[in-house]
Amino acid sequence: MDNFDHWFSTATKGLAQEEVKLLLPELRNHYEDTLQHHLGNGQSATDASAKAVASLGDPKQCNRQYRQLYFSESEYKSLFTPAQQNLIPSAFVVGMASVALVVVTIRLIYSVVVEKGNPDLGGFLMVLTLSLIFASLYLIARHCPSLRWPGPNKVGAPLPQPLPLASISPPEIAALRLSHILLLLSVITLTLMVANWSWGFAGAIFGPLYFLFFLSVLTMFIPIIRKLSRFGRDGQRSA
Amino acid sequence: MYSSVMNLKGSLPLLVLETLARGPSHGYAIAQQIKARSEGVLDFKEGTLYPTLHGLEREGHLESYLETMTGRERRAYRLTPQGFGHLQQQRQSWSSLSGAIGKVLEGGV
Protein backbone atom coordinates (compact mmCIF):
# COMPACT_ATOMS: atom_id res chain seq x y z
CA MET A 1 0.00 0.00 0.00
CA ASP A 2 1.57 3.30 -1.07
CA ASN A 3 1.30 6.68 0.66
CA PHE A 4 -1.80 7.71 -1.23
CA ASP A 5 -3.61 4.41 -0.66
CA HIS A 6 -2.99 4.69 3.07
CA TRP A 7 -4.21 8.32 3.13
CA PHE A 8 -7.27 7.49 1.04
CA SER A 9 -8.31 4.49 3.12
CA THR A 10 -8.18 6.64 6.28
CA ALA A 11 -9.98 9.58 4.66
CA THR A 12 -12.81 7.41 3.35
CA LYS A 13 -13.08 5.05 6.31
CA GLY A 14 -16.72 4.12 6.99
CA LEU A 15 -18.04 5.60 3.73
CA ALA A 16 -20.18 3.51 1.40
CA GLN A 17 -18.22 1.78 -1.36
CA GLU A 18 -20.30 3.61 -3.98
CA GLU A 19 -19.18 6.94 -2.50
CA VAL A 20 -15.56 5.76 -2.32
CA LYS A 21 -15.69 4.85 -6.02
CA LEU A 22 -16.92 8.36 -6.74
CA LEU A 23 -14.10 10.04 -4.80
CA LEU A 24 -11.19 7.79 -5.77
CA PRO A 25 -10.59 8.93 -9.38
CA GLU A 26 -10.65 12.64 -8.51
CA LEU A 27 -8.40 12.35 -5.49
CA ARG A 28 -5.99 9.97 -7.22
CA ASN A 29 -5.72 12.33 -10.19
CA HIS A 30 -5.09 15.19 -7.78
CA TYR A 31 -2.37 13.19 -6.03
CA GLU A 32 -0.76 12.17 -9.35
CA ASP A 33 -0.70 15.78 -10.56
CA THR A 34 0.93 16.98 -7.35
CA LEU A 35 3.41 14.10 -7.48
CA GLN A 36 4.41 14.98 -11.05
CA HIS A 37 4.82 18.62 -10.02
CA HIS A 38 7.27 17.71 -7.24
CA LEU A 39 9.12 15.18 -9.41
CA GLY A 40 9.44 17.87 -12.08
CA ASN A 41 11.09 20.08 -9.48
CA GLY A 42 13.81 17.45 -9.07
CA GLN A 43 12.65 15.84 -5.83
CA SER A 44 13.14 12.14 -5.15
CA ALA A 45 10.17 9.83 -5.63
CA THR A 46 9.90 9.28 -1.87
CA ASP A 47 9.92 12.99 -1.02
CA ALA A 48 7.57 13.85 -3.85
CA SER A 49 5.08 11.21 -2.76
CA ALA A 50 5.23 12.32 0.88
CA LYS A 51 4.67 15.96 -0.10
CA ALA A 52 1.84 15.10 -2.47
CA VAL A 53 0.02 13.24 0.30
CA ALA A 54 0.74 15.98 2.85
CA SER A 55 -0.86 18.56 0.54
CA LEU A 56 -4.14 16.65 0.76
CA GLY A 57 -4.32 17.36 4.48
CA ASP A 58 -5.02 15.35 7.60
CA PRO A 59 -6.95 12.26 6.46
CA LYS A 60 -8.93 12.08 9.72
CA GLN A 61 -10.06 15.66 9.34
CA CYS A 62 -11.02 14.97 5.74
CA ASN A 63 -12.92 11.88 6.89
CA ARG A 64 -15.00 14.00 9.27
CA GLN A 65 -15.81 16.38 6.43
CA TYR A 66 -16.58 13.58 3.97
CA ARG A 67 -18.99 11.95 6.41
CA GLN A 68 -21.10 15.12 6.43
CA LEU A 69 -21.64 14.94 2.68
CA TYR A 70 -21.38 11.28 1.68
CA PHE A 71 -23.37 8.24 2.81
CA SER A 72 -21.81 5.89 5.32
CA GLU A 73 -21.86 2.17 4.61
CA SER A 74 -24.72 1.54 7.03
CA GLU A 75 -26.81 4.47 5.71
CA TYR A 76 -26.32 3.31 2.16
CA LYS A 77 -27.19 -0.30 2.93
CA SER A 78 -30.35 0.60 4.79
CA LEU A 79 -31.60 2.99 2.12
CA PHE A 80 -30.38 1.63 -1.19
CA THR A 81 -29.97 -2.16 -1.04
CA PRO A 82 -31.70 -4.23 -2.19
CA ALA A 83 -33.12 -1.37 -4.22
CA GLN A 84 -36.15 -2.52 -6.11
CA GLN A 85 -37.24 -5.82 -4.62
CA ASN A 86 -38.71 -4.94 -1.27
CA LEU A 87 -40.22 -1.53 -1.97
CA ILE A 88 -43.80 -2.70 -2.45
CA PRO A 89 -43.86 -5.08 0.57
CA SER A 90 -42.23 -2.35 2.64
CA ALA A 91 -44.76 0.25 1.48
CA PHE A 92 -47.58 -2.19 2.14
CA VAL A 93 -46.46 -3.05 5.67
CA VAL A 94 -45.76 0.57 6.61
CA GLY A 95 -48.98 1.71 4.96
CA MET A 96 -51.09 -0.86 6.79
CA ALA A 97 -49.36 -0.14 10.09
CA SER A 98 -49.91 3.59 9.62
CA VAL A 99 -53.57 3.12 8.74
CA ALA A 100 -54.08 0.89 11.79
CA LEU A 101 -52.40 3.42 14.05
CA VAL A 102 -54.39 6.30 12.56
CA VAL A 103 -57.59 4.34 13.22
CA VAL A 104 -56.49 3.77 16.82
CA THR A 105 -55.63 7.48 17.14
CA ILE A 106 -59.01 8.58 15.79
CA ARG A 107 -60.77 6.15 18.15
CA LEU A 108 -58.80 7.59 21.05
CA ILE A 109 -59.58 11.16 19.99
CA TYR A 110 -63.23 10.16 19.76
CA SER A 111 -63.08 8.88 23.34
CA VAL A 112 -61.55 12.20 24.44
CA VAL A 113 -64.27 14.20 22.65
CA VAL A 114 -67.36 12.09 23.37
CA GLU A 115 -66.69 9.91 26.40
CA LYS A 116 -64.67 12.44 28.36
CA GLY A 117 -66.59 15.42 26.96
CA ASN A 118 -63.52 17.43 25.99
CA PRO A 119 -63.97 18.61 22.37
CA ASP A 120 -61.27 21.27 22.61
CA LEU A 121 -58.58 18.75 23.50
CA GLY A 122 -59.91 16.34 20.86
CA GLY A 123 -59.71 19.03 18.18
CA PHE A 124 -56.23 19.97 19.28
CA LEU A 125 -55.08 16.36 19.09
CA MET A 126 -56.62 15.94 15.66
CA VAL A 127 -54.82 19.02 14.34
CA LEU A 128 -51.60 17.82 15.93
CA THR A 129 -52.00 14.38 14.33
CA LEU A 130 -52.47 15.78 10.86
CA SER A 131 -49.70 18.36 11.35
CA LEU A 132 -47.15 15.76 12.37
CA ILE A 133 -47.97 13.49 9.46
CA PHE A 134 -47.81 16.30 6.93
CA ALA A 135 -44.67 17.78 8.50
CA SER A 136 -42.89 14.44 8.03
CA LEU A 137 -43.92 14.19 4.39
CA TYR A 138 -43.14 17.86 3.75
CA LEU A 139 -39.63 17.45 5.12
CA ILE A 140 -38.91 14.67 2.67
CA ALA A 141 -40.46 16.53 -0.27
CA ARG A 142 -38.60 19.72 0.62
CA HIS A 143 -35.20 18.05 0.47
CA CYS A 144 -35.67 15.42 -2.21
CA PRO A 145 -36.17 16.89 -5.69
CA SER A 146 -36.81 13.41 -7.04
CA LEU A 147 -40.04 13.21 -5.03
CA ARG A 148 -41.54 16.55 -6.04
CA TRP A 149 -44.29 17.17 -8.49
CA PRO A 150 -42.90 18.41 -11.80
CA GLY A 151 -43.55 22.10 -12.28
CA PRO A 152 -42.61 25.49 -10.94
CA ASN A 153 -43.68 24.78 -7.36
CA LYS A 154 -40.45 24.82 -5.38
CA VAL A 155 -41.97 23.25 -2.31
CA GLY A 156 -43.41 20.26 -4.12
CA ALA A 157 -45.62 17.45 -3.06
CA PRO A 158 -44.42 14.25 -1.44
CA LEU A 159 -45.02 11.93 -4.38
CA PRO A 160 -44.80 12.17 -8.16
CA GLN A 161 -47.96 11.45 -10.08
CA PRO A 162 -48.41 8.69 -10.97
CA LEU A 163 -45.63 6.95 -9.08
CA PRO A 164 -43.75 5.15 -11.89
CA LEU A 165 -42.93 1.95 -10.06
CA ALA A 166 -41.40 0.34 -13.14
CA SER A 167 -38.86 3.10 -13.63
CA ILE A 168 -38.43 4.38 -10.10
CA SER A 169 -34.79 5.12 -9.34
CA PRO A 170 -32.78 3.97 -6.30
CA PRO A 171 -32.68 7.45 -4.71
CA GLU A 172 -36.44 7.70 -5.03
CA ILE A 173 -36.76 4.36 -3.31
CA ALA A 174 -34.38 5.55 -0.60
CA ALA A 175 -36.41 8.71 -0.09
CA LEU A 176 -39.63 6.72 0.01
CA ARG A 177 -38.17 4.38 2.61
CA LEU A 178 -37.14 7.34 4.68
CA SER A 179 -40.60 8.85 4.37
CA HIS A 180 -42.08 5.48 5.45
CA ILE A 181 -39.93 5.48 8.56
CA LEU A 182 -40.82 9.07 9.42
CA LEU A 183 -44.50 8.54 8.73
CA LEU A 184 -44.61 5.47 10.95
CA LEU A 185 -42.64 7.22 13.64
CA SER A 186 -44.91 10.25 13.63
CA VAL A 187 -48.04 8.12 13.81
CA ILE A 188 -46.62 5.99 16.65
CA THR A 189 -45.68 9.16 18.55
CA LEU A 190 -49.15 10.57 18.07
CA THR A 191 -50.85 7.38 19.12
CA LEU A 192 -48.79 7.37 22.31
CA MET A 193 -49.61 11.01 23.00
CA VAL A 194 -53.31 10.63 22.38
CA ALA A 195 -53.46 7.39 24.36
CA ASN A 196 -51.86 9.21 27.23
CA TRP A 197 -54.57 11.87 27.32
CA SER A 198 -57.34 9.43 26.57
CA TRP A 199 -56.46 6.99 29.33
CA GLY A 200 -56.04 9.75 31.83
CA PHE A 201 -52.33 9.29 32.46
CA ALA A 202 -50.18 12.28 33.17
CA GLY A 203 -50.63 13.54 29.62
CA ALA A 204 -49.30 16.96 30.39
CA ILE A 205 -45.93 15.43 31.22
CA PHE A 206 -45.65 12.40 28.96
CA GLY A 207 -47.24 14.02 25.89
CA PRO A 208 -44.51 16.62 25.43
CA LEU A 209 -41.88 13.97 26.21
CA TYR A 210 -43.11 11.78 23.36
CA PHE A 211 -43.10 14.83 21.12
CA LEU A 212 -39.52 15.69 22.12
CA PHE A 213 -38.53 12.10 21.43
CA PHE A 214 -40.03 12.39 17.95
CA LEU A 215 -38.22 15.66 17.28
CA SER A 216 -34.90 14.25 18.44
CA VAL A 217 -35.25 11.23 16.14
CA LEU A 218 -36.24 13.55 13.32
CA THR A 219 -33.09 15.57 13.94
CA MET A 220 -31.05 12.40 13.53
CA PHE A 221 -32.60 11.89 10.11
CA ILE A 222 -31.89 15.38 8.79
CA PRO A 223 -28.25 14.70 7.76
CA ILE A 224 -29.42 11.65 5.82
CA ILE A 225 -32.13 13.70 4.14
CA ARG A 226 -29.55 16.31 3.18
CA LYS A 227 -27.35 13.62 1.66
CA LEU A 228 -30.31 12.34 -0.32
CA SER A 229 -30.80 15.81 -1.77
CA ARG A 230 -27.69 15.21 -3.91
CA PHE A 231 -29.89 13.21 -6.23
CA GLY A 232 -31.91 14.92 -8.93
CA ARG A 233 -35.29 13.97 -10.34
CA ASP A 234 -33.55 11.75 -12.88
CA GLY A 235 -31.95 9.74 -10.08
CA GLN A 236 -28.45 10.88 -10.92
CA ARG A 237 -26.09 12.02 -8.23
CA SER A 238 -24.88 15.55 -8.65
CA ALA A 239 -21.32 14.35 -7.85
CA MET B 1 3.36 35.81 7.11
CA TYR B 2 -0.05 34.50 8.18
CA SER B 3 -0.21 32.29 5.14
CA SER B 4 -0.38 28.52 5.22
CA VAL B 5 -2.51 28.35 8.33
CA MET B 6 -5.14 30.77 7.05
CA ASN B 7 -8.60 29.34 7.64
CA LEU B 8 -10.40 29.17 4.31
CA LYS B 9 -13.27 27.01 5.41
CA GLY B 10 -15.91 29.68 4.99
CA SER B 11 -14.51 31.40 1.94
CA LEU B 12 -13.36 28.40 -0.11
CA PRO B 13 -16.68 28.12 -2.01
CA LEU B 14 -16.41 31.77 -3.06
CA LEU B 15 -12.82 31.27 -4.22
CA VAL B 16 -13.81 28.18 -6.18
CA LEU B 17 -16.69 30.00 -7.88
CA GLU B 18 -14.43 32.95 -8.69
CA THR B 19 -11.82 30.64 -10.19
CA LEU B 20 -14.38 28.82 -12.31
CA ALA B 21 -15.82 32.12 -13.54
CA ARG B 22 -12.66 32.31 -15.69
CA GLY B 23 -13.46 28.99 -17.34
CA PRO B 24 -14.04 25.29 -16.67
CA SER B 25 -11.36 23.49 -14.70
CA HIS B 26 -10.65 20.38 -12.64
CA GLY B 27 -9.82 20.06 -8.96
CA TYR B 28 -6.04 20.19 -9.08
CA ALA B 29 -6.00 23.18 -11.44
CA ILE B 30 -8.54 25.03 -9.28
CA ALA B 31 -6.38 24.55 -6.19
CA GLN B 32 -3.25 25.73 -8.01
CA GLN B 33 -5.01 28.79 -9.43
CA ILE B 34 -6.25 29.87 -6.00
CA LYS B 35 -2.75 29.55 -4.56
CA ALA B 36 -1.07 31.23 -7.52
CA ARG B 37 -3.48 34.16 -7.70
CA SER B 38 -3.12 34.78 -3.96
CA GLU B 39 0.67 34.48 -4.33
CA GLY B 40 0.69 31.59 -1.90
CA VAL B 41 -1.10 33.41 0.90
CA LEU B 42 -4.31 31.41 0.57
CA ASP B 43 -3.18 27.87 1.21
CA PHE B 44 -5.51 25.03 2.16
CA LYS B 45 -5.57 21.29 2.48
CA GLU B 46 -6.49 20.09 -0.96
CA GLY B 47 -8.40 17.01 0.19
CA THR B 48 -11.11 19.36 1.44
CA LEU B 49 -11.61 20.87 -2.01
CA TYR B 50 -13.74 18.00 -3.30
CA PRO B 51 -16.51 18.18 -0.70
CA THR B 52 -16.68 21.89 -1.53
CA LEU B 53 -16.94 21.20 -5.26
CA HIS B 54 -19.53 18.46 -4.74
CA GLY B 55 -21.50 20.67 -2.34
CA LEU B 56 -21.57 23.53 -4.86
CA GLU B 57 -22.66 21.08 -7.53
CA ARG B 58 -25.41 19.77 -5.25
CA GLU B 59 -26.68 23.30 -4.79
CA GLY B 60 -26.80 23.77 -8.57
CA HIS B 61 -24.01 26.36 -8.75
CA LEU B 62 -21.68 24.05 -10.68
CA GLU B 63 -22.02 21.22 -13.14
CA SER B 64 -19.43 18.59 -13.88
CA TYR B 65 -18.47 16.51 -16.89
CA LEU B 66 -15.79 13.98 -17.72
CA GLU B 67 -12.98 14.83 -20.10
CA THR B 68 -9.77 13.11 -21.10
CA MET B 69 -6.59 15.11 -20.54
CA THR B 70 -3.03 13.83 -20.86
CA GLY B 71 -4.32 10.29 -21.15
CA ARG B 72 -6.36 10.45 -17.94
CA GLU B 73 -10.08 10.83 -17.50
CA ARG B 74 -10.87 13.78 -15.25
CA ARG B 75 -13.97 15.36 -13.84
CA ALA B 76 -14.05 19.03 -14.79
CA TYR B 77 -16.38 21.67 -13.35
CA ARG B 78 -18.01 24.74 -14.82
CA LEU B 79 -20.32 27.44 -13.47
CA THR B 80 -24.02 27.24 -14.17
CA PRO B 81 -26.09 30.39 -14.79
CA GLN B 82 -27.33 30.00 -11.21
CA GLY B 83 -23.69 29.82 -10.10
CA PHE B 84 -22.90 33.10 -11.87
CA GLY B 85 -25.79 34.77 -10.06
CA HIS B 86 -24.67 33.33 -6.74
CA LEU B 87 -21.11 34.52 -7.38
CA GLN B 88 -22.34 38.08 -8.00
CA GLN B 89 -24.20 38.04 -4.68
CA GLN B 90 -21.20 36.61 -2.85
CA ARG B 91 -18.88 39.22 -4.37
CA GLN B 92 -21.15 42.01 -3.15
CA SER B 93 -21.41 40.48 0.33
CA TRP B 94 -17.66 40.05 0.52
CA SER B 95 -17.06 43.57 -0.73
CA SER B 96 -19.32 45.13 1.89
CA LEU B 97 -17.86 42.92 4.61
CA SER B 98 -14.24 43.71 3.75
CA GLY B 99 -15.15 47.41 3.41
CA ALA B 100 -16.67 47.38 6.88
CA ILE B 101 -13.67 45.60 8.38
CA GLY B 102 -11.36 48.04 6.61
CA LYS B 103 -13.20 50.99 8.18
CA VAL B 104 -12.84 49.44 11.63
CA LEU B 105 -9.13 48.82 11.09
CA GLU B 106 -8.61 52.32 9.74
CA GLY B 107 -9.92 53.57 13.07
CA GLY B 108 -6.81 51.90 14.49
CA VAL B 109 -5.29 52.36 17.89
Image (cartoon, rainbow, N blue to C red):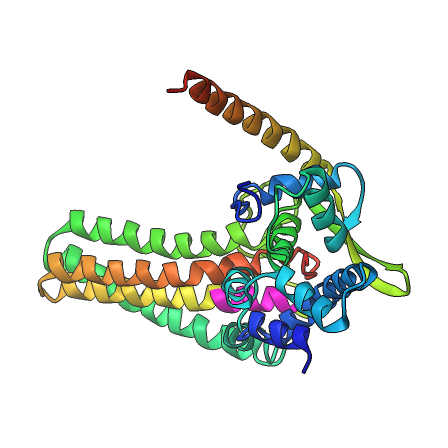
Quarter-of-image position of residue B94: top right
Which residue sits at x=71%, y=38%? B37
Can residue B105 be seen here?
Answer: yes
Is residue A6 positioned above or below A43 on the image?
below
Residue A196 is situated, as x and y percent measured from the top left of the image, at 16, 65
Residue A146 is situated, as x and y percent measured from the top left of the image, at 62, 56
Between B5 and A217, the one lying in front of the other is B5
Q: Is residue A96 left or right of residue A141?
A: left
Is residue A170 positioned above or below B38 on the image?
below
Q: Is residue A166 left or right of residue A39?
A: left
Residue A195 is situated, as x and y percent measured from the top left of the image, at 19, 66
Quarter-of-image position of residue A115: bottom left
Which residue sits at x=49%, y=56%? A140
Q: Residue furthest bottom?
A: A1
Between B58 and A123, the one lying in front of the other is B58
Between B10 and A75, the one lying in front of the other is B10
Quarter-of-image position of residue A20: bottom right
Which span of residues is magenta-colored?
A169-178
Q: Is residue A203 magenta?
A: no
Which residue sits at x=41%, y=64%? A182
Can residue A167 be seen here?
Answer: no
Q: Residue furthest right?
A: B71
Residue A233 is situated, as x and y percent measured from the top left of the image, at 67, 55
Secondary structure mostly seen in magenta is: helix
Is residue B18 positioned above or below B25 on the image?
above
Q: Quadrant of the C terminus of chain A?
A: bottom right
Q: Is residue A174 magenta?
A: yes
Between A109 and A93, the one lying in front of the other is A93
Q: Quadrant of the N terminus of chain A?
A: bottom right
Q: Is residue A198 left or right of residue A87?
A: left
| Count of all numbered marks drawn on residues in the image | 0
